[in-house]
Image: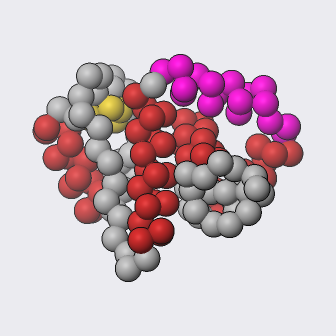
């Protein structure tokens, strides 16, 4: 995806360092993507609430799975394309738009869906908050 118009200066600096380190690469069209066979960057979360940190790291780890497991990513796209109704997709896009995500980026929309679905039990009807559980109780 092309990030030049949406990054803050701090984010642009991070991208530049990741490009320099070879973790990211620039495509012919100017987009930035993960370099094949390179390390994955995982988010660092800080909070006084341990459960909040755990849940944030789990959510971010699911993004790592999306980018490192082609079969998992393909299943996520298949679910988006064939497993959801138009109204469900529209509602998801509305939710992301409210959070100021770039909803024109299909990869981002699908990746966030899988990360939220696998970690947000309360959002998806599973009961108490926090990710990593067994789903509905």
Quadrant, the N terminus: top left
Judge left or right: residue 6 versus residue 35.
right
Quadrant, the C terminus: bottom right
Q: Residue placed at 48% from the left, 43% from the top? A: 62
Coloration mode: secondary structure
Judge left or right: residue 17 versus residue 65.
left
The answer to if 80 sits in the magenta stretch is yes
Q: Position of residue 10 (x, y in %)?
A: 25, 62
Q: Position of residue 56 (x, y in %)?
A: 46, 60
Residue 35 figure quarter: top left
Residue furthest bottom as drawn: 48
Q: Position of residue 135 (x, y in %)?
A: 69, 50
Q: Say which of 110 and 27 sits in front.
A: 110
Residue 123 shows in this picture: no
Judge left or right: residue 25 versus residue 53.
left
Residue 81 shows in this picture: yes
The answer to if 73 sits in the magenta stretch is yes
Q: Residue placed at 43% from the left, 76% from the top? A: 49
Q: Residue placed at 20% from the left, 42% from the top? A: 18
What kind of secondary structure does the magenta stretch mostly adopt? Answer: helix
Q: Position of residue 100 (x, y in %)?
A: 56, 62
Q: Quick check: 46 above or below 105?
A: below
Q: Which residues are magenta?
A: 70-86
Q: How many marks?
A: 0
Q: Residue placed at 49% from the left, 60% from the top? A: 55
Judge left or right: residue 61 versus residue 133.
left
């Amino acid at each position: 995806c092309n990030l030049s118009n949406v990054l803050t200066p701090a984010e642009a600096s991070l991208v530049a360092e990741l490009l320099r380190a070879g973790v990211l690469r620039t495509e012919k069209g100017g987009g930035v993507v993960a370099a094949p066979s390179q390390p994955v960057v995982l988010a660092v979360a800080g909070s006084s609430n341990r459960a909040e940190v755990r849940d944030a790291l789990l959510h971010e780890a699911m993004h790592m799975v999306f980018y490192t497991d082609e079969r998992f990513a393909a299943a996520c796209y298949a679910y988006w394309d064939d497993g959801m109704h138009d109204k469900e997709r529209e509602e998801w896009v509305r939710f992301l738009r409210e959070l100021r995500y770039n909803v024109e980026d299909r990869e981002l929309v699908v990746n966030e869906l899988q990360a939220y679905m696998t970690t947000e039990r309360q959002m998806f009807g599973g009961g108490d908050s926090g990710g990593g559980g067994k789903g509905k109780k």
